[in-house]
Amino acid sequence: MKRLAALAAFGLAFGSAAVADAPPSHYDITPLTKADVDLYLSVMRPASAYVANLKGEDKAAVEYMHSNHGNPKIPEPPKTPNFNHPPTQAEIAALQKAMDDYTKKSQKPQQYMARVATLSSYDEEIARQHHVEKQYDAVKDPIESAMAGIEGTGGSCGGDDCAPTQHPTAAQLALWKKEEQVSKANVAFLRPYAPEIERLKKPLHDVMFSH
């Protein structure tokens, strides 16, 4: 999500100590609730159902990207002739036609690529349609972090290696302990929902990667 990407960029630019000084979000220090998961599922279910049953141009876009392994083939633009004389009207018309043909041929792959990018995060489109973008963005991060813990794909660390600063204050230590407790609680709470969440996420993942 945008917020997560922004935090990552901020951390790279200014260092982990600056991030540590930022106030914790609600979900850093508060465990997930059933209402949070219900909101997440209310968005993911229609998003996953739509992407799992694509038709028309959406289906064509995904099939095109899969057939090209995610790299659309953009044609080379036509070469401009090196006229050694003032171009004739016929030559100008031929060059214009070549440019028009190139534009048409290059538009479709670009449109397909843009559409597939949208479909791969179609949950965000559903959240926008339902006017719950901010709420969904807030719950998606902790839910997917907990899912990474359940699936064993999340990072792990221990001891001082995890500390953003070398000399943490008592308040920072207390915050890190609270965040760790919340993270563990989220993993335990989300386990019963994990099979459905994994199933719902798969069609969106498969949009970008052929299977």
Image (cartoon, rainbow, N blue to C red):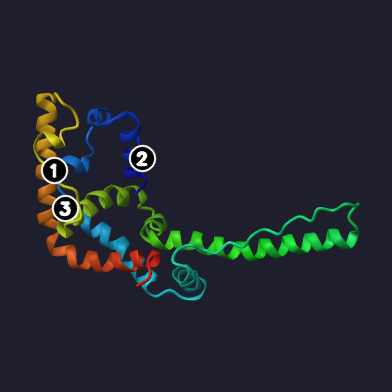
Q: Give left or right: position of 91 versus 40.
A: right
The front one of 84 and 180 is: 84
**Mark linked to residue 33:** 3
Q: Residue at x 25, y 32 (%)?
A: 16
Q: Residue at x 21, y 68 (%)?
A: 196
- Tag nearer the camera, 3 or 2: 2
Determine which residue is flagged by label 2: 6
Residue 133's x, y, as percent?
A: 36, 51
Q: Are marks 3 and 2 in contact (CB under 8 Å)?
A: no
- Tag nearer the camera, 3 or 1: 1
Looking at the rendered structure, the secondary structure element under dot 2 is helix
Of the 4 image quadrants, the one containing the C terminus is bottom left
The front one of 75 and 34 is: 75
Looking at the rendered structure, the secondary structure element under dot 1 is loop
Dot 3 amino acid type: Thr
Dot 2 amino acid type: Ala
Q: Quadrant of residue 110?
A: bottom right
Q: Earlier in the sequence, mark 3 or mark 2?
A: 2
Q: Earlier in the sequence, mark 2 or mark 1?
A: 2
Q: Quadrant of residue 167?
A: top left
